[in-house]
Image (tube, helix red, strand yellow):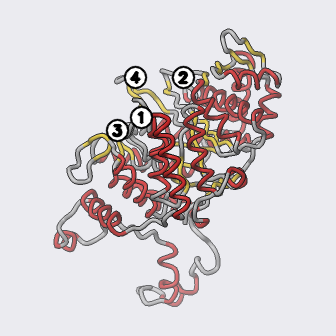
Amino acid sequence: MVGLKGGQLEILTRDQVYSIHQATMEILERVGVKVQEPKAISILKENGANVDERSQLVKIPEQMVKEAIKRAPRSFTLHARESRYDVRIEERRVYFGPMIGRKNILDLETGRRRPTNLEDVKNLVKLTDALENYRLIHSGAVMPHIEGVRDEVVHVVGYLAGVQNTSKVIKATARGSKRARDCLKMASILAGGEEELVKKPMVYTTVNPISPLQHSQEMTEGLLEYVRLKQPVDIAPEIQAGATGPATLAGVLVQQYAEILSGLTIAQFASPGAPIFCGTCSTIMDMRRGHIALGAIEAGLINVAHAQIARFYGLPCRGSAGDTESKVIDVQNGYERAMNLLLVALGGINYIFYPGTLESALTISLEQLLIDDEICGMVYRALRGISVDEDTIAKEVIASVGPGGHFLDKRHTLEFFAKEQYLPKLSNRDAREDWERAGAKDLWAVAREKVKEILSKHEPTPLDRSVEDELVSYVKEVEKRELSGR
């Protein structure tokens, strides 16, 4: 079952959360943020912010931030093409979504890394459509480059490839107003018109502040386009502790929320009630190498604290887990992703992003995407916890078996074993002799075979023909607009 509630783990006290809040408000009011988009600057200035238009520095009073928080919804629903895949975002409810749009992929046949092409994007989305523990899908529309596709039209070609291969919720880009409008137009076609899209959001996006304390023109343009139509936006800093933010994790949290809440203030004064995720991709920089470390345990700690602070504000949150710095399929790959997926889910992050990736999210793998779905299933089992009631306490069945008996033939066992146990589809629990007779395959080989089987058999729910024709026609319009004469 997806969408179970997390939040069982908290690492900050109430006083610590409040100290971070106070420091965040002080940074916003005394230091400010740089906003590089003129319309956003005007919105902030008109509503009480202290603006230096020459330097683009904006200082935001605490009362203005509090008003923005008050305007933001505490919960919202992202609507899928099939309602069974709708995603209800609310306090502590946890969903997983793979990060499909990566520069490189591990080839399914050779295992070697190569650039991701359009067929790969289609297969990644199709596989995700078939897997039970994923709901929100990072699509090719977000990629700056797909091998074999002109960069000017990647956003529409990638979005079309996504919606043709899944009926789950697909993410689109916010890289500039033009690209954002194109993706929103396609989402409105999918929804049955712009009014329907506003009523039932079907697309979402991410905007990344430039740390420390900057909102770029390109991303802020995209933010304004999405909130105009009330489509959810994930405002997600990617602070590297010690490089683009303080070395201390508490300092990272202060800076992170200054960046998030300033973005949220822009959004809520531009379009009151627009749904917003408080997002994070923040982690550490490994000071020995000068590289980001997305699989670090500190990333998990930042996420757990991030969820607590979001709950303090009454706001939905997005986090990051399921990546690794490992380049290959090894023990590091397994322990980094599993450790943080469990940690972050127990922290109560609403939308957990990064499954399927390796090499600091530079590379995606179909096999890893499948394996991570199984890890997510195990994490959901952990979130479900242990049910204690008159039936599960099993006093009567223990008494009926007594000393020295067994429970294999008991109705209680038949009734409860499948409810109590997570039964993995990939993990091997055979006796060694049986495993050897079956070919002594490792998990990666099993996953590769299963991926091929799914891709050959799974048929995503097709788009309505008229909707697909309109989407294809619009993509051709954008291609003509962007590529004519080039």
Residue type, numbered disc 2: Gly
Work out how far the residue at label 2 is from the one at label 3, CA to CA, in angstroms: 22 Å
Whether residue 280 is situated above or below residue 83 in the rendered picture: above
Q: Position of residue 239 (x, y in %)?
A: 52, 28
Judged from the image, the secondary structure of the residue bearing numbered disc 2 is loop
Judged from the image, the secondary structure of the residue bearing numbered disc 1 is helix
Residue lying farthest top? 54
Total of numbered circles in the picture? Answer: 4
- How many other residues sit within 10 Å of disc 4, few (<14), some (14-19) or many (≥20)? few
Front residue of 270/432: it is: 270
Q: Which residue is mark 2?
A: 245
Q: Position of residue 436 (x, y in %)?
A: 17, 69
Q: Mark 3 or mark 1: which comes first in sequence?
A: 1
Q: Can residue 209 be seen from the camera position used here?
A: yes
The quarter of the image holding the C terminus is top left
Front residue of 8/127: it is: 127
Which is in the foreground here, disc 2 or disc 4?
A: 2
Q: Which residue is mark 4?
A: 287
Q: Mark on residue 359?
A: 3
Q: Which residue is mark 1?
A: 151
Which is in the foreground here, disc 3 or disc 1?
A: 1
Judged from the image, the secondary structure of the residue bearing numbered disc 4 is loop
